[in-house]
Image: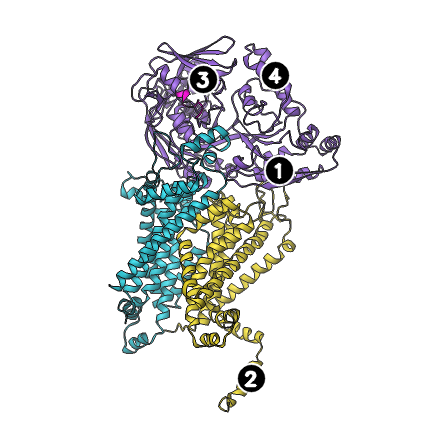
Amino acid sequence: MHPLLRTVLQRLGLGLITLFVVSLIIFSAIEFLPGDFAKAILGQSATPETVEAFQKEIGLDKPAHERYLNWIGGVLQGDFGSSFSSRVGFRRSVMEIIGPRLLNTLFLAGITALVAIPLALGLGLLAALYRNSIFDRAVNAVTLTTISFPEFFVAYILMLFLAVKFPIFHSLSNVSADMPFFEKLQRTALPVLTLTLVIVAHMMRMTRAAIISLLASPYIEMARLKGVSPGQIILRHALPNAWAPIANVIAFNLAYLVVGAVVVEVVFVYPGIGQAMVDAVRSRDIPVVQACALIFAVTYILLNLLADVISIATNPRLLHPR
Amino acid sequence: MEQTAPSAPQRIVKARRTLAQNIWRTLKKAPYSAWFGMIVIALYIFVALFAPWIAPYGEAEIVSQVPFDAWSWAHWLGTDQLGRDMFTRLLYGARNTLGIALATTLLAFAIGGGLGIIASIFRGWIDQLLSRAVDTLMAIPQLIFALILLSIFGSSVQNLIIIIAVLDSTRVFRLARSVAMNVVVMDYVEAAKLRGEKLGWILFREVLPNIMPTMIAEFGLRFCFVFLTISALSFLGLGIQPPTADWGSMVRENATLITYNDITPLIPAGAIALLTVAVNFVVDWFLHKTSGLRDEK
Amino acid sequence: MSELEQKLKQATSLAGKGKVSRRDFIQLAMLAGFTAAAGNAMFVKAVRAEPKKGGSARFGLAHGATTDTLDPVGYPDTFTQCAFWGALSNSLTEVDAKGNVVPDLAESYEPSDGAKKWAFKLRKGATFHDGKTVTPDDVVASFRHHMGADSKSAAKSLLDPIADIKADGPETVIFTLKDGSADFPYLVSDYHIPIMPVKDGKSDWQSGVRTGPFVLEKFEPGVSAKFKRNPNYFKSNQPYLDEVEFIAITDVAARTNALTTGDVDWIGRADLKTLELLKRNPNVEILELSGYGHYVLPMNTTMAPFDNNDVRTAIKYAINREEIQKKIFLDHATVANDNPIAKAVKYSIDPEPKYKYDPDKAKFHLKKAGYETLKVDLSVADAAFAGAVDAGVLIKETAAKCGIDINVVREAEDAYWDNVWLKKPWCASYWSGRPTCDWAFSIAYAKDAAWNETYWKNPRFNELLIQARAELDDAKRAAMYGEMQQLVHDDGGTIVLVFNNFVTANSKKLAHGDVAPNWENDGLKIAERWWLA
């Protein structure tokens, strides 16, 4: 079997086990949460009778293991179950609730990635090429500053300058599915910008460091002695060998875009999946929390797998062992 | 034996230099950015330690009858909604934010670092077990998991520290394990094992000193991440609880003021950012020094 | 009135309808002795004051969650209430801007048998959005939706007094109550009881087909709800807007920015901290209204030391309500005097003595109760009301000077109503208020009310409650409710800190008439009642 294929299969198998354990952990964690959906949703107006009626309707009166087995059985058949906010005669499937939000999140993450990754790579390579120059220091200082401020703060500042003082963009990013693409793009501009500022620094610094650490290796020394230009050395000799750490840090940041954008979603009122998950945790809507957790875990596992594949594929020693 | 004799006097000369001298020598060569970083960190530590003595008022003391009093000589940064002195809250915020972040990071390193080294020494099923457990934990989004756990256990300071430390220790584990893996295959560790040294000895005398530089650098970065995480949790209403002063919630509570050109909420955010930058400067220099990388063209 | 003044008055009303030009109006005003500038101002005011049709508006609400549904058994906060009741539906009655109950989907109502029987006659020609006529069967099913043993409706206990509902002919519904209740028409104005079409014997809430001023176009839970005008609405003049959209913006800074940038035309629950700064914006109007809602600190009157009325009175004197009003609510609340009935409510009194911060009186009552010093726990969380924790911090300070050592326990916000409220001896709580004395007292002060948060059982009070309910003589009722309010004030376990003001902000593009104080956002009916200036 091709070593690449073997790694992929191995990882996928492990991933499935991880998913199972994740679902088990999340399920039991929520079991320990004080209060349940009925009480959380009814708030002050919960009377013992209404709570009981509620619990019966959404099946909360059954023992925990039975509920878990029912749920996991459904998931194996591709059915994530119904949200607790369903009522008799009105099934609200989990996918119905988080589906559109997941698409929004992927849209936001995708656009941000399209902006941030080339930017980070470009800046990283240039900073490595002109290391210790004014340019290098300036880029370093700026990126360092942007990750040093809390995310919500960056968001508020951008909102102040680009939406309130100079109304270039919208302060609300309440996109919806039927919006034309360009309007959607314009509405998401501020969240994209915020997230870009947050993740570029990390990726750019890693790119720079990975390249620079290779510059001391003998084969680069050799190329330099041959008289290859510094730009060529970095692009042709250093970069191909630096893909592994770069791919890893990119995967990490992409996972963050899907999972960690809650704060940005709150500030810009972006209907993404993070907000849905926070709502679901607060209201103890277990099927929704579970589905979100699984989606996040899958994203994480797949992105890491991709990073591994890239590092193997770009490393001849790993690609052709022995 | 005879062969080593000529070098002996040299060694004695070297040994005469005390630790303090060594540190001084290194520091003298440090770039300005690192100096700046160290001074800032020292200042923060000083403020954190002596906040009760420096601060003009008490942490939760109500000193003004007017909410949102303006900047004045009595109240350098004005007062907050309840009439508490903002400057005092800022100083105490340093104490709380730094203390909690430091405790969390230390705990995360104790757990993650310890287990990482153990995994690398024993290998086999212990390594497999720990690594898989960590993989699983990492696949659960941190912020959400913290949210659930904090709801279960309540968001007291101790719980906050423990929960974030455990979640954060996964990343420390990975790093410690991979770095230690490179060390434990070295001959001197093998030798120690063959000599029949105890686990603690191998851990503290052979492995730990050799992975220290990388871990210290990581410690600095993790420390910054931890208090950015805490401020994000405060933003979502689950971080440090009032009346304890912390920078994250100070920004959050007054964020709407920014729209009206009032820069008071900028100050705690600036305090967070300045410290992060300072730590990064020091870490950069430290990494540069210990890794022996040469940046020449 | 001179002829000119008469003419000017006429012109003012015509200007509102757009039938007089600005030029003509100003000329007339100048003839009547006004300057040109004053005339212009009068013209602008006249134009704004008269409702106009057309246009669209976006409302930024402080609530909204992914768990929201169209089902009226829920409607937990202003998002569902404003959108799915105020804009989409009607109840049988509604409360107007003066706090009086007036017919809505019902045309008229008539009590009989000592207010035990109520006949509601439905409005002729009222239809659902799909064109179906509203029948008594629809009404019966809409009420039954909340009743019955397995109901999980928040309105279940509200409708408990109803013994039977039945249709009587093609346009009348008869309610039979367990006891007489003069205030029953108020009760059916509740936002939980919109009238929905009946389908297979059950209320069809899923389709979103109702009777209201707007037709539902799109609803994304936790994001937004979009509506367009109902062309066949039974109130011929309302609504004024063609399209409305409700947007959920829970972050207060984001909400404020959305208003200033024009992404929304109105926001609910404006940020009190920066309200003064928002007021400087020339395009923004701020609306502040004292409603029925109040923030309370209920003490369990069956548990020591709160079972002693002198202890309760001592604590009532140990709280500086003015300071709390000023610092926590930044003057956007009205100091209360342990009477849960707001001034705007009929039969409200202002009981004496006033509980002002008075360490001497507090110490006096404490001593009378046999305590030199007292140590008690106060459980708070911002889930009870925003600012509850800070209020606890302030109370601790003032009470300490009265010899009362209060340990402020910060409880978890999650599950607060479940674990703390009705369980801890002294905690923080919130009431959105009710439009009648009877309703407010029955729900939280009657001896076996499920939400009697103080476990207060005053025999005289409970006796009066039953008597007053069936009494149809106004003067006698006033006397009874007055005595009851005095009892709650003197002997009750509830500390009513303040009545909260509803503070909203809107772009001056929007205009409105007198605003109803019974609930937030013009009685939740902002979509129906407001128009574009």
The quadrant in which the C terminus of chain A is found is: bottom left
Residue B230 appears at what percent x and percent y?
49, 51
Q: Residue at x 37, y 45 (%)?
A: A292
To which chain does the residue with label 3 belong? C
C-alpha gap between disc 2 and disc 1: 69 Å
Camera-side residue of A293 and C92 = A293
* Amino acid on which the number 2 mark rests in the picture: Val
Q: Which residue is mark 2?
A: B13
What's the magenta region? C142-150
Which numbered dot is residue C32?
Answer: 3
- From the rendered image, report the letter of the chain displayed in yellow: B
C-alpha gap between disc 3 and disc 4: 62 Å
Q: Are marks 1 and 3 on the same chain?
A: yes
C-alpha gap between disc 2 and disc 4: 100 Å
Secondary structure of the residue carrying numbered label 4? helix
Q: Which residue is mark 4?
A: C463
C-alpha gap between disc 1 and disc 3: 64 Å
C-alpha gap between disc 3 and disc 2: 108 Å
* Amino acid on which the number 4 mark rests in the picture: Glu
Numbered disc in front, either 1 or 3: 1
Residue C110 appears at what percent x and percent y?
46, 10
Q: Which residue is mark 1?
A: C378
Q: Is residue B122 above or below residue C427?
A: below
- From the rendered image, report the letter of the chain displayed in cyan: A
Q: Residues within 10 Å of mark 1 (few under 14, many from 20)?
A: many
Q: Colour of chain C?
A: purple
Q: Residues within 10 Å of mark 3 (few under 14, many from 20)?
A: some
Q: Earlier in the sequence, mark 3 or mark 4?
A: 3
